[in-house]
Image (cartoon, rainbow, N blue to C red):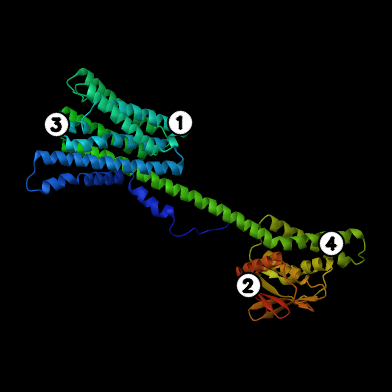
Amino acid sequence: MSTRMNVGNSTVRQRFLPHAEAVRGTRGVLWSIALAALMLHPYATVLLLDRTTQQRLEVAGLLSTLLADVMLLAGALILTLDARLTQSGLRAAMATSAALVAAQDAPMALLSLADRALGPHTYRLSIGHLLTVLVVVWVIDRGKRRESAALRAPFLQGLLLGIALLGASLGVHVVADTPLLMLDEPGDVAVAILIGLTLAAIHVQLSRTDLPRWASTRLGLGMGAIFAARVTSTVLDAATPPPAAIALVALFSALITTTATSLFLCSLGEVNQHAQDSARRAAEAEAEVTHDREVAPDLQVATASIIAGVRLLTAGGLTSDPQRRALTRMISSEAERLGRALSADSTIAGEIDLDALLRPLVVAHLALGHDLTWVPGGLRALGRSDDVSEAVSVLLNHSRLHPRSITTLSTVAADDRVHLDVLDHGADPDVVLPPGLARGLQRARRLLREQDGTLEAVEGGYRITLPVAIGAAAA
């Protein structure tokens, strides 16, 4: 038996997945470019001033760098939420990496606004950057192996690692004459190449994980952008932030943040889909339990009827061949119906010979000692025979609650309908329906409604109404 369940027209998946799709692929890169342009708005402010000076452009570059670091921190927070949602060590490692890069660079950008001599440290390659990328390799590797420590406060871990790396970089600045790389020195060129190779290794690391290909590609583009920005500034031996390099820094932050956002939205959609599947399975299980409770009284009576019939046949007390044949047919008919009910199969809708349908039920209840009278009416109706049998059985079971009453079963045609009445004469009106029979009545009403029929209470009992078969009324 299958059950449909509507979980709402506006689900989390429906709300968020279109936005996740919007930041994938080419559209995702376009969104990243637009976000990067937004982070470069200090340059637009400077250009709108009456006098554009080198000093103002330098401040604009440092402010844009600071905005990029803030955006990177936002991406780290989103990745942290994603890691918690998916319990992914890799997502946690990515959050840690983004946070440590931002925590290392943002203080330098702030200090550079006060001391221009520190400015080059925010946009040129330095020995500290080699240490940074090596730590990121270690963090990603730990996340790939899903170490439990990777899931513990990844954002805070990133901040602490970033502060530690910043301290190490400042220590190098104190000890060395200049921690900045000079590409006319072979040793510095080797360090720059090593940084580039390490960034490439990080991209390879990510591409061999369970990250979607579009995500690892975008993260690779972001790392390429930040490396190109540093190399450009270093090659130019820039004393002030080159606008092109700062644009690449902003693009790096935008690519990381939009990728993190898309991954998080996809995770929300997957979690919601899982919740929908679980809810559907729970609803199906509940429907199965409800179905079993509804049909249990009918199945119990059918089983009891079969047992009683078998006992009567084997006891040898029957002297009439018609009685034996009637009991045999009842046992066969009820056993077949019982088998279909237990296997969740059902007869298809069609023409029903009501006398043939009612006869085994009457014989079954007589075998159980039910005081029941019935006169065949020779009528035919439209519907599903098993469902109509179940509905009649529920009503007869109800009648058996009144031991001092006499039950009459009759059928009559009325225009294009057939009325099937189950009436109790001398019934006790104070008898309360057991919960099982009450559920059975509800199920019977529902089954009859599905085939253009009804079940309603009338004086002295209940009436089932079904569409009449063609020609039945005339007959």
Residue 102 in the image: x percent, y percent?
A: 29, 37
Q: Which of marks 3 and 4 is nearer the N terminus?
A: 3
Identify the disc placed on residue 145: 1
**Which of marks 4 and 1 precedes in the sequence?**
1
The quarter of the image holding the N terminus is bottom right
Q: Is residue 314 left or right of residue 359?
A: right
Discs 3/1, front: 3
- Against 450, residue 277 (above or below) is above
Circle 3 crowding by C-alpha within 10 Å: few under 14, some 14–19, many from 20: some
Residue 466: mark in rendering = none
Contact check, label 1 and label 4, Cβ < 8 Å: no
- In terms of sequence position, does the residue under pointer 3 or pointer 2 come before the other? 3
Image x and y of residue 419, in percent: 68, 77
Q: Is residue 93 left or right of residue 287?
A: left
Residue at the spot of label 3: 239
Hey, what amino acid is under mark 1?
Answer: Arg
Q: Crowdedness of circle 4 by 10 Å Cα count: few (<14), some, many (20+)?
A: many
Q: Percent from the top left, x then y, of residue 104?
A: 29, 33
Element assignment for label 3: loop
Front-lying residue, 169 or 310: 169
Give the residue at mark 4.
309
- Image quadrant where one finds the C terminus: bottom right
Could you tell me the amino acid type at mark 2? Gly
Could you say which disc has been placed on residue 453 in the image? 2
For discs 1 and 2, the disc positioned in front in the rendered view? 1
Question: Which residue: 14% across, 34% down?
Answer: 240
> Can residue 199 be seen here?
no
Q: Which residue is drawn at 12% across and 41% down?
A: 56
Amino acid bearing label 3: Ala
Label whose residue precedes the other's in the sequence (3 or 1):
1
